[in-house]
Amino acid sequence: MLVNLMGFSLDPKGAGTLKSYVSAHQSSVSADALVDHVLSLGAGYAVIEEPYVDKDYSADYLNFYAAAFRNYPRHTKRIHLFAKSVEPALRLPMAEQQTALEEAGYLGFVVVRPIAQGPIGRTILKFPSLGPDLLVRSTVRATFNVHLLGSRLELTGAAPFIQQDERLGSCAQASIWMAARQVHERHGRTPWHSIADITALATTPTDADLSQHLPAGSGGLNPIHIIRALRAMGHQPLFDFFLTESESGSEDAVEVRREAGRSIVRYLDSGLPVIVALADVGEKVGHAITAVGYVEARGAACRASHGYDAFVRAIVVHDDQRGPYRLMPLTHDDVGSLPKDRLLIYSDKPLTVEDAASHIFVPLPSRVFLRADRADTVVRDFLESYVEQVGGAMLLRIDGVVPDAALAVKDFYALVTSGRLIRRTYLTTAGRYRHHLARADLAEEIKTELLVRRLPHFVWVTELISPDCPPPEGDDARNIIGHMVVNATSSTDSDFDLLMAHMPHVLVHRDINVEIGADPPFKETALIFEMHAPYRGRKRLD
Amino acid sequence: MSKLPTLRAPGFSQMTDNVEFQDLTPAREHIDDSREVNLRDLGFVGRVSDEALEEIRRNESRANLVVRTAATFAFR
């Protein structure tokens, strides 16, 4: 058996051929969206590698298709996508091909499974670019090494996508796969799992719900099944719910709906994928998709919010039924600012986070015991208490040491008391926090004070941002006026959550490792610094 | 520079006292008393307020409603 490579240009006719392959010659919204995305990346040439042994499809084959009476092929096709033709590159001596292939601009690949009801297998493509006014934050991404006839091609900044096959799994399993595969590839803290593995973990032990469909689990998963699968895969499953019993349109209901976008952005900003469930997108049928990034407006805040969603127009989602890298606006007000051809459409209307997101599931690292919303509440509470109780006294102390500091300190207090201060809260490790801090354009004396403090392995960092901060430069992060660090491995007493607070001219350090029985069980020391200037927030890298 | 006392492990290895250690911890700037404030002296104890604790409890309760939706929602 030989490996065959067949290339073709992605002119309109070639794009039609690609669509035929990824749709199995059927009408498919997902296939249309995939091809449109590929063309938007600038793909000009495709190479079909056949036969291709795909580990994921092999697992599906072993668990279902091999036992079917009808013959299903064992192997798949893999379609590689390049910006330019690779025909000249593949005519070169083998040793020179890798460089030439890299120069042809590798954009990723699509595995095409030999099953008509879900031909799009493991798909690794780059994130989209959406023009000068919108910044795509590809927060949930990984680096993949791809081998093509002995040449190794590296693909950075991609989030895995897959379509459900309706036999081994539904959208729920596909969304878990898309979330978990990125965590596996990027962080390496959980094992590799196929769709068949996920179904097996979600359906053990089985129940009546699961057994309504054959094979068990192929008809969808409920929230408990999703949580069970994530835990068995080695994650700490975090979940949240954004529907209330309050009257629709009431202040409480509106705030809970807004919290959905705010919360999703916090986890995405942590480099964690978010499984977003949409409770009502059909006749008593819910749907699950995977959020892999978000789209930020380049200019000023686009809504009043105390979270980083203030700057966010949409989340970037993989929807196994609507295609990779679709956009889900946070609210209807954001729809007009986004490219229409990428919106998630249901019943001729765009689905928004505010209206449609009902549940979220997040595969947290197993050592994280503190929710993002709790970290954010603790930070806000500290800032409000600090300004209210000792803001005046501290201002006098600061004024005695740094005479021209009063304006910056008063401005900061005003942002806190008015509720206009924007908090960008994300999870990171102490190592990465220090790595960013060491490179930040923050005064060296403050950096040193922060860097030498002992920290737990995981921390929640909250960057403090003025709503009037200037637009980010390039794809950099926005400027911040301070930041706070919360212990992410805390779980019982909220008084032990906050560890450090950097505010204009002041750094507060809370030592929670004091003698047993001390009241309060921590010591808080404030250091006053002469220097204060906004500094760059964290830009999440691979 | 400092010298550590000799530590002698029985058997195979030995740490000697003739190594000079260099302290590589970043040098913190000297902070005089006027710039260091014990917040408790100003009457501040940064305990999490009852309102914040109630908000945390409310958020956790809302999140836990997910479990109650298991019989209602299936995602396919």
Image (spheres, coloured by chain):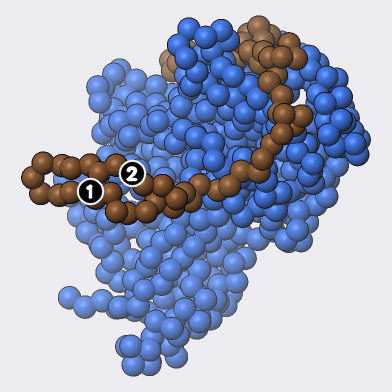
Query: What residue lies at 46% left-to-right and 33% top-to-bottom?
Result: A456
Query: What residue lies at 8% left-to-right and 45% top-to-bottom?
Result: B11
Q: Amino acid at mark 2?
A: Leu
Name the element at disc 1. strand
Q: Quadrant of the N terminus of chain A?
A: bottom left
Q: Amino acid at mark 1?
A: Met
Name the element at disc 2. loop
Label 1: how many residues lie within 10 Å, few (<14), some (14-19) or many (20+)? few
Residue B15 disc label? 1
Numbered circles on residues, count: 2
User: On the picture, is A59 further left or further right than A512?
Assistant: left
Q: Nearer the viewer, residue A455 or A222?
A: A455
- The answer to whether mark 2 and mark 1 are in CB contact below 8 A is yes
Q: Nearer the viewer, residue B63 or A86?
A: B63
Colour chain B is painted in = brown
The chain painted blue is A
Q: Position of residue A95 (x, y in %)?
A: 33, 88
Which residue matches tag 2? B4
- The numbered mark, 2 or 1, whose residue comes first in the sequence reads 2
Which chain hosts label 2? B
Q: Position of residue B65 (x, y in %)?
A: 52, 14
